[in-house]
Image (cartoon, rainbow, N blue to C red):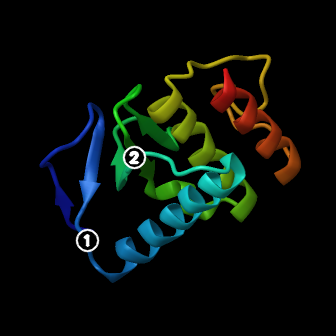
Amino acid sequence: MRRNRKHQLEGNINLINDDATFAKRRKVINIVREASKILGERLPRIEVRITEHEEQGVLGVASLKGCVINICDQSFSKSELALRHIVLHEICHTVFGTVHDDKCPLMAPFISKTTKAQQDKAFLKHAKS
């Protein structure tokens, strides 16, 4: 897979926008739109990048309050619910400036087993705080 080193966050290597990368990006953008509906208002424009990360096991990276999220290519091998969890987690970082919180199932640094309803509730909690 070709890589693009332009405009990348530390540790990430942006993948070139071919058809496969574009399809993955579209999945993430659809989850961002779903997050806007959960919130009941438009989120700011979020730049979505599909990347590889130098560290194994990193599924997503965001700049705090920077409106840029990097979703690692290996995230797409997870379930749809896990991908949704990763994207909502990164939105909380990049839009609301939320930091990791081991007590919150959405904002813990590792994916926890959550339902869609639990993800929505945690997302709203961080959006309103």
> Which residue in the rendered view is the most extreme toward the front?
41
Kind of residue at badge 1: Asn
Q: Out of 33 and 51, give the one closest to the viewer.
A: 33
> Which residue in the rendered view is the most extreme toward the left?
6
Tag 1 or tag 2, which sits nearer the N-term?
Answer: 1
**Vertical placement of 97 versus 110: above or below?**
above
**Residue position marked by numbered label 2 in the rendering:** 70
Determine crowd level at label 2: few under 14, some 14-19, many 20+ residues with C-alpha closer than 10 A.
many
**Vertical placement of 69 versus 110: above or below?**
below
**x, y percentage for residue 98?**
56, 22
Kind of residue at badge 2: Asn
* Image position of 81 (left or right of 91): right
| Residue 63 makes an appearance in the image | yes
**x, y percentage for residue 31?**
59, 60
Q: Residue at x 53, y 69 (%)?
A: 27
Q: Residue at x 68, y 17 (%)?
A: 101
Q: Out of 56 and 107, give the one closest to the viewer.
A: 107
**Vertical placement of 64 versus 22: above or below?**
above
Q: Residue at x 79, y 30 (%)?
A: 105
**Residue position marked by numbered label 1 in the rendering:** 17
The Cα–Cα distance between marks 2 and 1, rounded to whole angstroms, is 14 Å
Q: Which element type, helix, strand or loop, lies under badge 2?
A: strand
Marks counted in the figure total: 2
Q: Which element type, helix, strand or loop, lies under badge 1?
A: loop
> Which residue in the rendered view is the most extreme toward the bottom?
19
